[in-house]
Amino acid sequence: RKEVEQDPGPFNVPEGATVAFNCTYSNSASQSFFWYRQDCRKEPKLLMSVYSSGNEDGRFTAQLNRASQYISLLINSKLSDSATYLCVVNIDYGGSQGNLIFGKGTKLSVKP
Amino acid sequence: DADVTQTPRNRITKTGKRIMLECSQTKGHDRMYWYRQDPGLGLRLIYYSFDVKDINKGEISDGYSVSRQAQAKFSLSLESAIPNQTALYFCATSDLSRGISTDTQYFGPGTRLTVL
């Protein structure tokens, strides 16, 4: 089983639509969860951390279900949200504490 | 100025050549990382360093070596480049001094390496 799995997409949505990205992770001891955004040929940048109680940041809502080892990201989309979204989970064992495992990313394309 | 810089930004080289990619950071972070990214494979960890005297292999270290010259500098070397090392390489930093919950990583702009 892959450590972090995401639907690769692409998701093609009209502007204003709410799109949901899902992610599952295999390491039940993981403690930190993130969504990163990556534009084409650019570096990944932190979009938001994901907290146990769920959290919002403007048009972005992240949710975590530890029992199911499942993370989600909802976006009330704008044109500028077109990018690839990476689900990221930390490794929490041995000397690798703090290292991160990146999903392969879900591509979003928002159309006018 | 960017907090994490990488040089060169683009490099084309030939099989068998030795290549060094450099990374510098002004964030004052202890931890530094080298990743490669290939289409369809996502980011994969090559090496990481928790401080100047600590170097660790990542998932795909074969064919690579690193040097942590100072807290702010972490270089990646390909001793004898081969075509399947053609990829986008990212350096990243993080700061665990405040505990594991703040292990956000900050990435440099990347180096696009082509090995012919």
Image (cartoon, grey):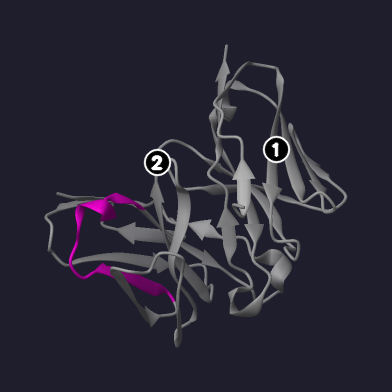
Secondary structure type for disc 1: strand
* Subunit under mark 2: B
- Amino acid tagged 1: Asn
Q: Residue furthest top?
A: A112
Q: Which mark is residue B39?
A: 2
Q: Which residue is mark 1?
A: A22
Q: Which mark is residue B26?
A: none
Vertical side of A108 occupied by A36: above or below? below
Disc 2: CA contacts within 10 A as few (<14), some (14-19) or many (>=20)? few
Highlighted range, magenta:
B72-88
Task: Look at 54% across and 72% down and name the residue there.
Answer: B29
Residue placed most toward the observer, B67 or B38: B38
Secondary structure type for disc 2: loop
Q: Are marks 1 and 2 on the same chain?
A: no
| Left or right, residue B60 beside residue B63 | right
Task: Look at 26% across and 52% down and name the residue there.
Answer: B84
Dividing the picture into quadrants, the one containing residue B62 is: bottom left
Q: Position of residue A46 (x, y in %)?
A: 60, 49
